[in-house]
Image (cartoon, rainbow, N blue to C red):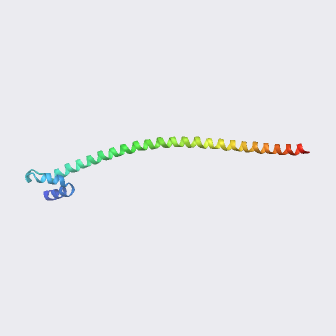
Amino acid sequence: CQSPSLWREEVRSRFPEVYREMSSRSECLVSWRGALLNALREHLLAERLRLAALEKRTREALQVAEARRHELCTESDYLAHTSEELRARLGRCRQEAADADSWRASGAVGGSV
């Protein structure tokens, strides 16, 4: 497409600041196609840099989250193990209490006879 007016309109619609800057120049010195290409390249570069920074921050946040997840899983395993031990200990204590109660009951009955 060789029509400068189409390139000029494309620059005007996509990059108004570039259009204003280029419009102040002599029409014979302006390459609207070149201006559009340069503006697109600059825009893509800026977007690529923005996304690279975002990706870096996201990866760092992911590493922090994974480390925290690992800590929480380790803590959860420890607490589950401790809970099992406490339940077993409670069961033993209850059994010992029941045995002591039955011993007292049998001793009290035997002592009164």
Which of 104/75 is in front?
Answer: 104
Q: Tell me: residue 13, above or below residue 50.
A: below
Kindly indicate the quadrant of the structure image that contains residue 100.
top right
Residue at the spot x=89%, y=45% of the render? 112
Residue at the spot x=72%, y=42% of the render? 93
Kindly indicate the quadrant of the structure image that contains residue 20.
bottom left
Question: Which residue, as the protein is rendered here, is positioned at the far right?
Answer: 113
The spot of residue 89 in percent (x, y) is 69, 41
User: Can you see residue 58?
Assistant: yes
The spot of residue 86 in percent (x, y) is 65, 42
Kindly indicate the quadrant of the structure image that contains residue 91.
top right
Residue at the spot x=85%, y=42% of the render? 107
Quarter of the image containing the N terminus? bottom left
User: Can you see residue 31?
Assistant: no
Number of numbered markers: 0
The spot of residue 73 in percent (x, y) is 53, 43
Residue at the spot x=40%, y=43% of the render? 59
Which of 18/35 is in front?
Answer: 18
